[in-house]
Amino acid sequence: MRINFPELSTQQIQNLRDAIECYREKRLISSSSPPVLYIELTKNCPSRCIFCRPRWNNHPLYTMSKEVFARILEEYISSAVLVSVNGWGESLILPDLDEYIDRIARFGPKIRITTTLGYQNQKALQSFIDNDVFVSVTFDYADKFLYEKNRKGIHYDTVIRNLEFLTREMKKKGTLSQNIRFAVAPLQSANLSQLEKIIAIAAHYGVSEIELTPLFARRINPNLLVYHKKKTCAVLIKCAKEADNSGIRLHLHYSPFRELYFKEHAFDLCCHPWLYGFVNYKGDILFCDHLIFPRYSRYLLGSIYDERERVWNGERVQILRLSHIRRDRGGLPKTCNACYLNGRYADHEHVLAEEFGRWVVTDKNIAERFLCR
């Protein structure tokens, strides 16, 4: 992903600088608005992935209202440099997704989306091209049978057809290398053997980045990579070399077990409480896109209808920032503690500023720095 900073407004640039300065100086009161904004347009997802098991499919109440979206545009978009149009659900199912994207694009931020590409929505796909949207394609099985078995309700042929369209059109615009990636999520023992084939498919279509997100689940889950250390290391070392030969960068999202903890790349203080805002479909605001589960409702910072200053500098967010600074396990959500424990690395923070670049784990790190044999 690449943010075209010369095309951003003075307000957007200054807001990002202020946010990074507040983060760097560990201030409890921020002088900025969140420069990174996640908008959960819908919580609906018709697919029935076996590792997800959502409790919803297609309920109109789980889609963001026009009123909430208009409020976001009014209060937050003009200061954001990066806007992601997804949350728990699959935004590609929205028939008017292209209209949402077009309205956000008028303010000039970089737009991104995470999607399976499993639904046909030609207007939305064309809007991705027209507005240089960064598309993170969740793609964790290369074989059609296994893909459809694990992601029930999604047709593999639809995914490939959409992928072919996007990569072809991005190539015409010269944006292919910077506007699409594969996200192998989750990476688990069940699909480790698929990784080499996924790299081959990425190389075939010109996808130059693959993010690996290890399965995060209860310790009793036998698919956790911690129970398959030797196999995991062997596969990743081999695949890192294959990726390097194909000009593909592998990005390890976080360490699946301690032997793969790259201390110099893991963040020592999460930037999300200072840089991120997540607005769910109801208009509730959180500080991180990982806290989308109902059990994290007690960490809500406020509502889209509250004054921005009250949300972004209120007592709740100050307590959360202080808990991060002090690494207070009791005051942090379990997901935050897990991020620190497992050495979570950057997703796209490195595109915001050079100082976040150290958080990226590259293919050479994976190939040359493995500590387990």
Image (cartoon, helix red, strand yellow):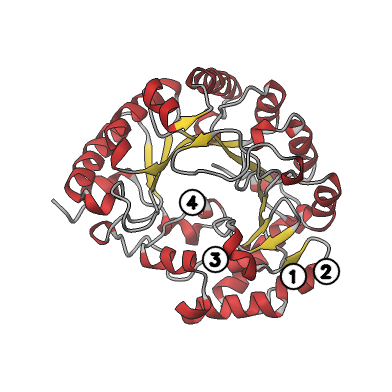
Q: Circles 3 and 2: CB distance less than 8 Å?
A: no
Taking 293 as reference, is 321 above or below it? below
Number of the front mark, 2 or 4: 2
Front-most of residues 289 and 74: 289
Q: Name the residue: 43% across, 63% down.
A: 339
Q: Name the residue: 57% across, 26% down.
A: 174
Q: Secondary structure at mark 4?
A: loop
Q: Quadrant of residue 124?
A: top right
Residue 74 in the image: x percent, y percent? 85, 54
Residue under circle 3? 271
Q: Secondary structure at mark 3?
A: loop
Q: From mark 4 to mark 3, how far is it between C-alphas?
A: 12 Å
Graded by Cα atoms within 10 Å as few (under 14), some (14 to 19) or many (20 or more), the crowding at tag 4 reads some
Residue under circle 4? 347
Q: From mark 2 to mark 4, how far is it between C-alphas?
A: 29 Å
Disc 4 or 1, which lies upstream in sequence? Answer: 1
Which amino acid type is shown beneath numbered disc 3?
Cys
Front-most of residues 50 and 284: 50
Q: Name the residue: 53% across, 33% down.
A: 116
Residue 15 appears left or right of 220: right
Rendered-image quadrant of the N terminus: top right
Residue under circle 2? 307
Q: Circles 2 and 1: CB distance less than 8 Å?
A: yes
Disc 1 or 3, which lies upstream in sequence? Answer: 3
Q: Quadrant of residue 32?
A: bottom right
Number of the front mark, 3 or 2: 2
Number of the front mark, 4 or 1: 1
